[in-house]
Image (spheres, coloured by chain):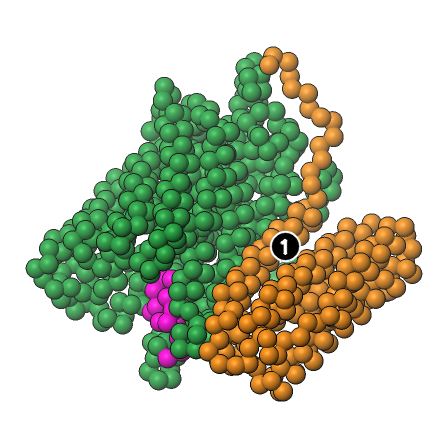
Chain colours: A orange, B green
Amino acid sequence: MTAAPAQSLEWKMPSTRKVAVISLILTESALFTIFLVAYLFYMGRSLNPPYPSQVLTFPLFATIALLSSSFTIVFSEMALHRGNRLAFHFWWALTIALGAYFLWFTGTEWKHLIFTEHLTLATNVFGTTFYSLVGLHASHVIIGLFLLTLILVLSLLGKIPADHTEHIEMISWYWHFVDVIWIVVVTVVYIISIRY
Amino acid sequence: MNHETLDDNFQIPPPERIGAERGSLTRIVQEMVFTVDHKTLGLMYIASGLLFFVVSGLMAVMIRIQLAVPRNHFLDPDVFNRLFTMHGTAMVFLVGMPIIFGFANYLIPLMIGARDMAFPRLNAFGFWVFFFSGLLLYFSYLGAPGLYAAGSAPDVGWFAYSPLTAKAFSRGHSTDYWTLSLLLGGIGSIATSINIIVTTLCLRCKGMILGRLPLFVWMFLVVAFLVIIAMPPLSACQIMLILDRYCGAHFFDTQAGGSAVLWQHFFWIFGHPEVYILILPGFAVASEVIPVFSRKPIFGYPVMVAASVMIGFISLGVWAHHMFTVGMTSIGNTFFAISTLLVAIPTGIKIFNWIGTMYGGKLRFELPMLFCLAFLFQFLIAGLTGVMLAIAPFDWQLSDSYFVVAHFHYVLIGGLLFTIFAGLYYWYPKALGKMPDFKLGLWHFILFTVGFHITFFPQHISGFLGMPRRIYTYDAGRGWDLWNLISTIGVFFQVIGILFFVFNLIYSYVKGKKAGDDPWDAWSLEWATTSPPPSYNFETIPEVRSRRPLWDLKHPDDPDWKYE
């Protein structure tokens, strides 16, 4: 090549926020993988009851709630891009409500398991891996809910400038990640391990 | 991102108050605490890494004195256990990691033509979390004793195999200091690595496409990805261990159906990529130093990049070669033996490429080049013993013997530490504006290289003769006496070498001659700015057209982009 290579006039780099959030999701996925592997490894290895087949029931409504919250947050973002703040607040608040319902369900499920079924972290390896895996997911739901609520409050106070839609989009990416993880967790815990 | 908006990332000027004079101690401390500048943080990383290096190096000296002669009574067995645990943990997490992050922080923005890291405050957060995790680990000597007359510092080995860490066998809080310190350090490492990834992918100056990225930056990109994938398993291990010890969980409790082997799997899923996290920065430094001191561009740039990425991928699937003696299935043994042997291919490619770079070059034997040459030979030996240990039946014979100790010290000292020295001498003029003294550096090089081989080469032999690692003493007449004595003698050569090194760092800063912007006649962008660089790095952001941007600037009549 003898001629100078043509430099493109536009020099565009990926958004720092997006790359950072993708990296964060990657590293969180690695963390979840280890807890999932621990759960799968100890499946059917508990020395004493209760076993998953005796105490677990499929969390139908909670799963529906969490999965639909992924759709409501998309509607919310669409409203934001249209500039419709009212619809944005409505769908965003609905997302929070659905997430909160999920968390409330996990709370009641754990209360039932602990006080009625006498399954704790220390009962057997099922208890150990179940509470650590589902608890890890629930802690991410809590962080997600905190971030969602923060955005809602700031937006209602009018503290979010119009050009900060990408910041909000990043929160929704995190929330989608929490949802996807739940699909994996619910499959492993409530569908696969229920046979043991 | 265009350059106008880069103003967001500027260093916040330190607050001018409390009447502290410029250059006074309070002012310096104040600047260190408040700084978000990638160069200052990079130097703080390296300085604290060197500080921990001296402390845990002295621990190694004590270990060697104890083992010099059979039936020695220099140290008690429990003190010895704490020393090798703290030495290993500190060298990996408090010396290796911060020094490589220091290099990354200081150099990546300069090499890609950026004004700072992508997230300067996250950067400062990462440093302080690391620093306090280090202090927490060492605080165990003071904070852990107390109840039950239990031990003070952690004494379970750096990989803390279960059930040694169970509440029944590790009373008191020594293991908890280890756990919490590594959990904290992991958070800091992940934060810094995300920052490295984002900086590399999003803040490159105009024309710096991935195909023109300096190899140094490419290898750190691979390292950062390895950290964010391999560090969470370690954090998961620590969380599980805390649950086991304090909440009655049974992850690693074999009496309740738990598995001690699971700890080994989880730990080494982190632990083996960690080895590559530590050695790839060594390759990164060698890939910058060797071309400059051979006066030739790097041989086989695309192959070097491909080999680094390949090492990254393969390293995620080799962990159980640390566990051949645990008793896996023959399929498991075969898989991990083959995957481990596969790593030798990209690594071998790299060694050939460095030799290819030097071939026909006009070699200049300056300090950085000397250390890189020693690195090539030593890393070759380390690689060869690595291939030997990858063969499962061979490993059954020598696992947990001094042969393994010799192998990984050849990797981490002969490989990593030598390139760290090369890098420190190479970029010293850039960071501090003064040339390192050649004579003092040569003494450092000779004493340290000789001492290193005297110390660690005999350990191959004592390993063959059956000496297990981590024993605090041994009986006379087993054939180990001579090799251990030689080993201990070598340590003192290394200590004197390090004294020369430390003295050189200080002496050259005070008395060294001025370096100028580009003392080595190099080609990457960090040499295009002043030494030391201003806080905004570049007055005008450069535009890159080839892999050697500074060569193009210096030789407008014969630029590289004509040929690439």
Secondary structure that dominates the magenta span? loop
The answer to whether residue B49 is seen in the rendering is no
Across and down, in percent, residue B167 comes to 40, 78
User: Could you tell whether B129 is left or right of B13 in the image?
Assistant: left
Side of A162 where B266 appears, left or right: left
In this orientation, does residue B301 appear? yes
Q: Secondary structure at mark 1?
A: helix
Q: Nearer the viewer, residue B272 or A53?
A: A53
Task: Please say if B65 is above or below B348.
Answer: below
Percent coordinates x, y for residue A128 in the rendering: 52, 74
Seen in the image, is B407 located left or right of residue A57? Answer: left
Q: Position of residue B374 (x, y in %)?
A: 31, 37
Q: Which residue is mark 1?
A: A25
**Which quarter of the rendering shows the N terminus of chain B?**
top right
Q: Amino acid at mark 1?
A: Ile
Residue numbers of the magenta segment: B155-168
Closer to the camera in the image, B448 or A185: A185
| Magenta stretch holds residue B158 | yes
Q: Residues within 10 Å of mark 1 (few under 14, many from 20)?
A: some
